[in-house]
Amino acid sequence: IQVCDNKAYIVNSSAGTIQIVDLNTGDHKEFSLGSSPEFCVVVSANEVYVDLYYDGQILKLDTTVAESQNPIVDTLTLPSGSGLSAYNGSSSGYARPWTMRKIGGNLFVALNNLDSSFSPAGPNLAAVVDLSTFTVSKVIAGAGQNMANVYYSSSLNSDDVFLLSSGAYYSNAGLVEI
């Protein structure tokens, strides 16, 4: 759930929707988005970004449109296969966007780098999306597996971005990288 301008933006992964609820009036609308939306970043009502986990995509939405209209303004397909870092020279990885964070004019997207059986195909990754062009400007490879989150704090007086990895699902090896 993200809140912006007295509206709650609720992503429902199992239903494949985003619901917008006006916190003052209780009015709401719901839009169907596709395969497994996981997270949203709300810049304004007409600039909302939602990741689609199974499709490896980021959607740019304008949620000011009527519920009967399509809110999708643009779609960005994330790199996969040879566009990702891989283990053992494999090129079978799929970018699975997990969480996102807007930092300056960029959207940092935490990516699980998984093969078709959802096993790690390579190290965790973060895609940096330039919001002015809505393109991937770079992909940052980490040392861990299963990227869990991207964190940034302006209070640290630093430009460091923290990449948090949950580790392999069958181990206890989490990791924080700067």
Image (cartoon, helix red, strand yellow):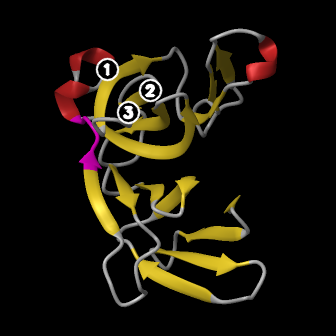
* Nearer to the camera, 46 or 78: 46
Give, as a three-letter code, the residue at label 3: Val
95 relative to 160 in the view: left or right: left
Residue at 42% across, 17% down: 141
Res. 85 mark: 1
Residue 26, by quadrant, is bottom right
Category of crowding for the residue at label 2, using alpha-carbon neighbours closer than 10 angstroms: few (below 14), some (14–19), many (at least 20): many
Circle 2 or circle 3, nearest the eye: 3
Give, as a three-letter code, the residue at label 2: Leu
Quadrant of the drawing holding the N terminus: bottom right
Q: Secondary structure at mark 3?
A: strand
Return the x and y of residue 82 as percentages of the image width and height.
Answer: 18, 26
Res. 129 mark: 3
Label pair 2/1, CB-CB below 8 angstroms: yes
Magenta stretch secondary structure, dominant: loop
Res. 125 mark: 2
Residue 27 lies, with reference to residue 74, above or below; the image says: below
- The residue range painted magenta reads 76-80
Residue 6 lies, with reference to residue 131, above or below; the image says: below
**CA gap, disc 3 and disc 1:** 17 Å
